[in-house]
Amino acid sequence: MSKSSSSAAAPPKHREISDTLREELARGKFKAGSRLASESQLVARFSASRPTVARALRTLQEEGLVERRAGSGNFALEPTSGSRTNKRTLALLMPDLGHTEIFQQIAGEIASLARVRDYSIVWGGSEQPKLDQDVSLQHGEELCAQFIERQVDGVFFAPYELLEGARDVNRRIAGNLHDAGITVVLVDRDFAPFPQRSALDLVGIDNFAGGYAVGEHLVKLGCERICFVKPPRAASTARARVAGMRDAMEQHGHSFNRDWIFEGDPSSAVFLRKILAEGKPDALVGANDPIAALLLQGLAKAKINVPGDIRVVGFDDCGFATLVSPPLTTIHQPCREIALACFRTMEGRFENPLLPPRNISLPAQLVIRESCGAYL
């Protein structure tokens, strides 16, 4: 089995090309209707292959920024929102924005899309890019009130987790925004407990499929006792990941015991000893990469070898996943694709408010590294 490439490396070439051309379009380098450089010229400019350039142009076409005319070339389009008399305003309500890498990436991509399509964007309570450090529930309700007062058109909302009372506050925020006529797109997770769904559009990865991929991979490596570690009051995504992992084990002839789900602080030596005292696990699966990294750290302090004694897997494929020792096997979060799907979902809801609630689940990709012992 060949090793999967690291997501912490430089971005793919096609993304570099589409990002550069997107910025040039935003700055007005190409007027609406003007011809862009030919594919051959772009191949030479970016030292890239023709399929790579074609993929970059296809991305811009999907975003409504470029029109590709067979036999004629590629032409700049007027931003889809440019003909509106009143510019729409979008807001980001992502409590983890200042602390979680994937939300920083998703928010940055959403802001880039908003800029090229002539939307105003509000980062929490600011119109400038800002990583809000206040993650309290009270602050979230204050931002919700501000958005309603400002009459924003849409909010990208990543519901609160981990905090006592988060579920009620999430429902209140979503309800207040909806009652004010503001379009809401949920990002990454729902506030309803899995497998229930709220009546709002949701964009994220297929967490059940991600859990299944992890479980199947570990079973094929010979694991029978696989424990899942999550923090108290974790988001509904954790339950979906556990459900997928359990299904994979059962499909391959192994039972899954609910006692193998551990809820607590992975940085605590006492908590780790509790996990190990329940019976030596073959593998530990963290609800996300930070939890998996803390498990790696705790196991190293306890002189337990990873992956020789216990295999460890995470979720999200954060930038540090290749920097921990050993490098972390994990599920990749396609942040740019999530942001694009969020934006399209928001615009689709603007165009047709009567659409039924949509659940856009992007594929979950398993990235295999040394922490699961696949290459020993």
Image: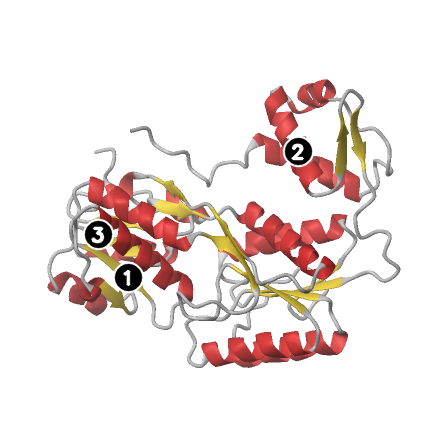
Picture disc at residue 328: none
Please name which of the two marks, 3 or 2, marks the residue nearer to the observer: 3
The amino acid on which the numbered mark 2 sits, given as a three-letter code, is Arg
Label 3 sits on residue: 250
Q: Which residue is mark 1?
A: 229
Q: Amino acid at mark 1?
A: Val
How far apart marks 3 and 1 lie (CA) works out to: 19 Å
Viewer-side label of 3, 1:
3
Q: The residue tagged with tag 2: helix, strand or loop?
A: helix
Q: Position of residue 211 (x, y in %)?
A: 34, 52
Q: Quadrant of the C terminus?
A: top left
In the rendered view, would you say 23 is above or below 140?
A: above
Residue 193: percent from the left, percent from the top?
41, 70
Q: Quadrant of the N terminus?
A: top left
- Residue at 44% x, 52% y is 206
The tag earlier along the polypeptide, 2 or 1, is: 2
Report the side of 6 relative to 27 (left or right): left
Name which residue lies at 33% across and 42% down.
Answer: 327
Which residue is labeled 2 in the image?
58
Q: Is residue 238 left or right of residue 57?
A: left
Tell me: residue 25, above or below residue 83: above
Q: Residue at x 60, y 20 (%)?
A: 49
Q: Measure how far apart labels 2 and 1 are at the Cα level.
A: 40 Å
Under circle 1, the secondary element is strand
221, 45: nearer the viewer: 221
Coordinates of residue 170 in the picture (x, y in percent)? 52, 75
Classify residue 208 by image quadrant. Answer: bottom left
